[in-house]
Image: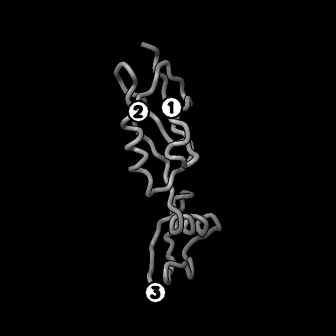
């Protein structure tokens, strides 16, 4: 049996969660003080996801800060960065503008998090 230790990040309590795994399956989850902690551990162990925040080049020069509109599979973050690194956003850019639609076919848009005036 394999033991995985996690610190829950859903609320400020930061519960120390222990999950027992056998053959890649979760056998038990302990240490959480609420259901959200259990849900966090289940998601983190079966389908870890992250919000991607980075910068992207702007056509004509400069950078714009961007983020994923929703979480992305953790294992796809570097692939997403490869795509972002070759694209250039077109000005003018407003906060919330979609700069890359449906990155890698994952159903998640990359959006601007700041304004950039036109050149």
**Residue at image location 54% in from the left, 27% down from the top:** 95
Q: Which residue is tagged 1?
A: 99
Disc assigned to residue 1: 3
Q: Which residue is tagged 2?
A: 87
- How many C-alpha atoms fall within 10 Å of the one at disc 1: few (<14), some, or many (≥20)? many
Q: Where is residue 77 shown, x and y percent of the image? A: 43, 50
Q: Where is residue 67 shown, x and y percent of the image? A: 48, 39
Kindly report which numbered mark, 2 or 3, lies closer to the viewer in this rendering. 2
**Residue at image location 58% in from the left, 66% down from the top:** 37
Kindly report which numbered mark, 2 or 1, lies closer to the viewer in this rendering. 2
Rendered-image quadrant of the C terminus: top left
**Colour mapping:** one colour
**Residue at image location 58% in from the left, 46% down from the top:** 107
Front-most of 7 and 49? 49
Badges 2 and 1: C-beta atoms under 8 Å apart?
A: yes
Q: Where is residue 74 shown, x and y percent of the image? A: 46, 56
Eyeballing the image, is 75 above or below 107? below
Label 2 or label 1, whichever comes before in sequence order: 2
**Residue at image location 57% in from the left, 69% down from the top:** 42
Q: Secondary structure at mark 3?
A: loop
Label 1 or label 3, whichever comes before in sequence order: 3
Eyeballing the image, is 56 above or below 33? above
Front-most of 92 and 18? 92
- How many C-alpha atoms fall within 10 Å of the one at disc 2: few (<14), some, or many (≥20)? some
Q: Secondary structure at mark 1?
A: strand
Q: How many marks?
A: 3
């Amino acid at each position: 049996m394999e033991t995985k230790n996690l610190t829950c990040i859903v609320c400020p309590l930061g519960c120390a969660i222990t999950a027992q795994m056998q053959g890649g399956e979760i056998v038990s989850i302990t240490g959480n003080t609420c259901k959200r902690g259990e849900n966090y551990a289940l998601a983190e162990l079966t389908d870890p996801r992250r919000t991607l925040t980075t910068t992207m080049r702007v056509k004509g020069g400069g950078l714009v800060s961007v983020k994923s509109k929703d979480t992305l599979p953790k294992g796809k973050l570097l692939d997403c960065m490869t795509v972002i690194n070759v694209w250039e956003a077109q000005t003018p850019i407003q906060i919330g503008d979609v700069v890359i639609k449906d990155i890698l076919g994952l159903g998640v848009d990359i959006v601007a998090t700041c304004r950039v005036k036109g050149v």
